[in-house]
Amino acid sequence: MANTNTVRLTMAQALVRFLDAQYVELDGVEHKFVRGFMGIFGHGNVTGLGQALEQYKEDIPFLQGKNEQGMANAAIAFAKQTGRLGIYACTSSIGPGALNMVTSAAIASVNRIPLLLLPGDIFASRQPDPVLQQVEHPLDYTVSANDAFKPVSKYWDRISRPEQLLTAALNAMRVLTDPAETGAVTLCLPQDVQCEACDYPAAFFAKRVHHMDRMPPAASAIARAAELIARKRKPLVLLGGGVHYAQAVDEARAFAEAFGLPMVETQAGKSAAAWNHPLGFGGVGVTGTLAANRLAAEADVVLAVGTRLSDFTTASKSAFRHPEAAFVSINVSPMDAMKAEGVQVVADAREALTALGAELRRRGYSAAYDADELAQLKQAWDAEVDRLYAADVSDGLAQTRVLGEINRFVGERDVIVCAAGSLPGDLHRLWRTTQPKTYHMEYGFSTMGYEVAGALGVKLAEPDREVYALVGDGSYLMLHSELVTSLQEGRKIVVLLFDNSGFQCIHNLQRGHGSDGFGNEFRRRDSETGQLTGGYIPIDYAAHARSLGANSYTATTVKQLQEALVQARAANTTTLIDIKVLPGTGTDGYESWWHVGVAEVSTSGNVQRAYTGLQAKLSEIGATRR
């Protein structure tokens, strides 16, 4: 007689059914966690997980990726835009298909974004051995290509028997729904085991709600933080991505307003403070505004909320220059909270800000900022942005002018997506947002090729918003495959392609450190010198997009850009605008510094001078050479 408390399924079928029953709860509201699968089928998953997804196709959606990294990047963007309350699982074949997702795993783990990867793996039975695409390690036969995911995953497992799914799936959900430890979760699925059947407990497939309880701050931690801040006169509120994930934007603004404190933002935190808020001073650090960087230099205490304090935020530890500068770090991650050796408040951002504000009010705290001086600082920066947005050059389009036209055109609720090149610096400094979660920047890993796929992921999460991918020509050439997926799924995105004929961001970095410029522009090889110093390669990106089925336009003038933006908004399908911008027409500096290595010895006098300058800067900030 059959046991009615079990269900006989293949491991792959059981995995799909389990994931379809997972929910998360935040503040009393439940959200279905796994919204669907993205995948590309191959011999490592098509007859296992592919069969299961076909069997349950009425229950859980499947989106066909065009490149494994592209689809996984789209899944990351979806999870980020939902505030980590929903994910798409990603499945691939073994070998090259699986390894294409390793970069995405790093993106997710660095940025603390939940990403479930289900790569196919070699046969556990070893009967067809070595299987196609198997990497054989002579000293450890249990190693497969999927072991490459270990350093970039927050949880890694290989399910070599079907019953192992019971513990592996629960551990996966444990990590995926942990605000502090979330990131990439990789479950390696041997292709034979995917197809093996097992009598699974029926309870395994029941609806399961994972409660994302807000971590309250310890009263003693709040007391220590308040005691430190109470001794200081010029606190600076530094808003990171955790402010968005904790849905603490209102609390952060109220905290700043209560004590008259200026707010500055990381790339992940941008849009938490509206650009026109009197206490909002924009991005800080290497890509920061002049106003924010001057405030950072004068701050005697920094309240860092939900940030990893990366080198771009701290300008390689040179941004906060007050001789008595101290830190209070609010973060759900103890590792992040301990950075800068400040007072640690390991807690949910919303709960901690509320408690800290109440304690400071109880103490009657007030800061020493002069409101008129802050207003003048802000007005000066706003005027600088206006100047850059109106920049006019005689021989083409300046990048800052293009950004100004786009910024004025897009709606307040429209979302822009970006990741790499010179655009993140210009956007962090110049882009004006008034609504939270309208600035979607992947800058933890700064992954070239994230932009188009990321825009698709945002559109899946926010189907009623216009979504714009701002991407350089270098990033577009690296990865644009999910533009086709957006057409296939009827999810319109607008790709704004900034064509400056090369990797110009790195070209500028080279030249800023003594180089004449080498290997970063898209030039033909010169027949006489044998170097890449010939003419620029003319590439018609609009024609390429049309060949894939998208609408497209080319803009070489402001008027053409304005007309193309209007046409793109009116369209009901994915559109690409190929914008020809002049190299070297972005922004730079604003009293910030970034530590990059410079050759200690060189035949170039410019490089030698750059190295001397680097050593002087390191001596100035008190860094030690290792």
Image (tube, rainbow, N blue to C red):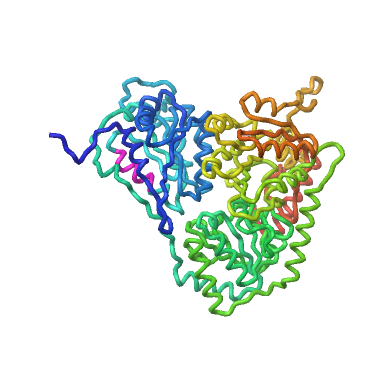
Residue closest to the far left: 1
Residue nearer the viewer, 386 or 342:
386
Residue nearer the viewer, 610 or 228:
228
The N terminus: image quadrant: top left
**Residue at 77%, 37% in the rendered image:** 581
For the magenta stretch, what is the residue range? 164-173
Does 228 sit above or below residue 5? below
Is residue 607 at least partly visible in the picture? no
Q: Position of residue 456 (x, y in %)?
A: 56, 38
Give the left or right position of residue 554, taking residue 63 as reference.
right
Does 41 sit above or below residue 116? above
Residue nearer the viewer, 181 or 394:
394
State which quadrant residue 590 falls in.
bottom right
Does 212 sit above or below residue 189? below
Assess whether residue 170 is covered by the magenta stretch.
Answer: yes
Q: Position of residue 88 (x, y in %)?
A: 46, 40
State which quadrant residue 145 falls in.
top left
**Residue at 51%, 64% in the rendered image:** 344
Residue nearer the viewer, 514 or 408:
408
